[in-house]
């Protein structure tokens, strides 16, 4: 299912996420390799986590270790 994305956003799928470690990875067709995501970059209140297979939108930024996801939103 396609979702309306805001300008600058990319859609991807959660590949792996660890609640304990507070980070994981997203894959997206527009990028080679995995995109790092930290729990602090997930938009929401309280404990923020992702589930494998969830569709998300995000803004890709250049981080210390390559492409990183920011402003991550879970798509319903």
Image (cartoon, rainbow, N blue to C red):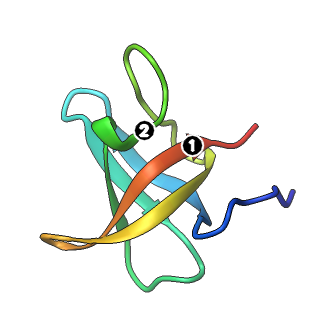
Q: In the rendered view of the protein, which quadrant contains the C terminus?
A: top right
Q: Earlier in the sequence, mark 1 or mark 2?
A: 2
- Please report contact status of discs 1 and 2: CB closer than 8 Å, yes or no: yes
The answer to whether residue 3 is left or right of residue 52 is: right
Q: Which mark is residue 42?
A: 2
Which residue corresponds to the image point at 73% horizontal and 60% vertical from the top-left? 5
Quadrant location, the N terminus = bottom right
Which quadrant of the structure image shows residue 18? top left
| Near-viewer residue (16 or 40) | 40
Residue drawn 58% across and 57% down?
A: 13
Q: Residue at x 81, y 56 (%)?
A: 3
Q: Residues within 10 Å of mark 1 (few under 14, many from 20)?
A: some
Query: What is the distance, in whole Å, between disc 1 and disc 2 at their CAs?
Result: 6 Å
Q: How many marks?
A: 2
* Residue located farthest toward the front when viewing the structure as drawn: 7
Q: Is residue 3 above or below residue 31?
A: above
Residue occupying image coordinates x 42% and y 30%:
49
* Residue 59 drawn above or below residue 45: below
- Label 1 SS: strand
Q: Provide the residue designation for mark 1.
A: 73
């Amino acid at each position: 299912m396609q979702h309306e994305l805001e300008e600058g956003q990319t859609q991807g799928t959660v590949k792996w996420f660890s609640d304990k470690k507070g980070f994981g990875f997203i894959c997206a067709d527009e990028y080679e390799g995995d995109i790092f995501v930290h729990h602090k970059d997930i938009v929401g209140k309280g404990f923020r986590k992702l589930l494998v297979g969830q569709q998300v939108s995000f803004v890709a930024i250049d981080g210390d270790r390559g492409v990183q996801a920011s402003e991550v939103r879970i798509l319903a």
